[in-house]
Every structure is written in C-alpha cells, then in structure tokens.
C-alpha cells in the first residue's frame, strides 16, 4: 500500500559520503620525525577531553617537541577552533617563534576550519 502511494518508511541512507578525516589538508612536514635539535622548530598540538563532576571540559595544548614543555594551552566547555586559536596565540606570545616553525596537529575540524 505504501509503495502504491509513493511513500516510504525511512529516508534512504546516502552512500559514498566523503570523510575529511582521511584527506590530507596540507603537506606533512614532519614525516613522523619528532626529534629536534632546538626550541621552537616544531610544536605539536592536540585536544583532550576531561570529565569532571559537573561536566566535561576540553583542553587544547601546544607542546614544543624539543623541550617537551607546554608552551600554550586553552580550556573550554566545547572543542572549538577558537580554543585552538587561543592556545596557539598564547604559545606565539610566549615564545615568539621564527619564520619556518612547524605546527603539527591532527586533521580534526577544530584545526582544519
């Protein structure tokens, strides 16, 4: 009866949806070689989720690959691009890196937006 009336129970799933997770957004300048011989040559960044009693919070950190020190960080209730920008701004203000320094991060939407 539904077929005769031209209606269906659920919308059909779309096939072949693109997933940007597997697409390279830029050239890989690190090539899995994280060792450096001086400060401010390579920074690495990531976002971590931390559950608390009240709610979960997200922390974005920027780490200097050579010294293994956190050079910038930001905490927010949601993992946003603004949180990433705040952490990078803190790192840049504190370290004043030279031209050519590389920031290595994943391809999450907070970094690729």
Image (cartoon, rainbow, N blue to C red):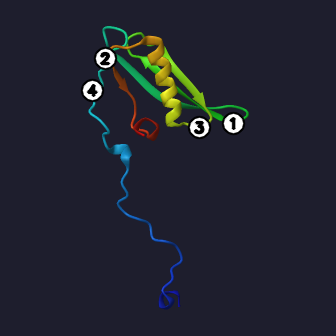
Question: In the image, is residue 36 above or below residue 111?
Answer: above
Residue occupying the point 47% across, 18% down:
91
Provide the secondary structure element on which disc 2 rests.
Answer: loop
Pointers 4 and 1 in contact (C-beta within 8 Å): no
Q: Is residue 60 visible?
A: yes
| Labels 3 and 1: the sequence-earlier one | 1
User: On the image, numbered disc 1 is attached to which residue?
Assistant: 55
* Residue at (30, 25) in percent of width and height: 32
**Can residue 47 be seen here?**
no
Cα distance in 3D space between marks 4 and 3: 29 Å
State the separation of the CA atoms marked 4 and 1: 37 Å
Front: mark 3 or 1: 3
Q: Position of residue 55 (x, y in %)?
A: 69, 36
Q: Secondary structure at mark 3?
A: loop
Check contact, mark 2 vs mark 1: CB within 8 A.
no
Q: Looking at the image, do the residues carrying marks 4 and 2 touch, with CB atoms under 8 Å apart? A: no
Image: 1 above or below 35: below
What residue sits right under mark 3 in the picture? 78
- Residue 104 at x, y percent in the picture: 37, 26
Q: Which residue is mark 4?
A: 29
Q: Reading the chain from its start, which is encountered first: label 4 or label 3?
A: 4
Residue on which disc 2 sits: 99
Q: CA distance from mark 4 to mark 2?
A: 14 Å
Q: Residue at x 73, y 32 (%)?
A: 53
Q: Which sits in the foreground, 70 or 112?
A: 112
Q: Is residue 51 above or below residue 98?
A: below
| Residue lying at the far right of the rendered structure | 54
Q: Are marks 3 and 1 in contact (CB under 8 Å)?
A: no
Give me the C-alpha separation between circle 2 and circle 1.
Answer: 39 Å
């Amino acid at each position: 009866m539904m077929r005769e009336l031209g209606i269906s129970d659920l919308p059909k799933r779309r096939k072949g949806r693109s997933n940007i997770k597997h697409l390279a957004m830029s050239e890989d300048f690190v090539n899995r070689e994280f060792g450096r011989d001086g400060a401010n040559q390579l920074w690495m960044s990531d976002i971590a989720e931390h559950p608390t009693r009240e709610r979960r919070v997200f922390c974005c950190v920027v780490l200097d690959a050579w010294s293994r020190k956190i050079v910038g960080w930001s905490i927010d209730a949601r993992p946003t691009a603004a949180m990433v920008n705040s952490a990078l701004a803190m790192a840049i203000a504190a370290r004043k890196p030279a031209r050519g320094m590389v920031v290595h991060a994943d391809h999450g939407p907070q970094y690729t937006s």
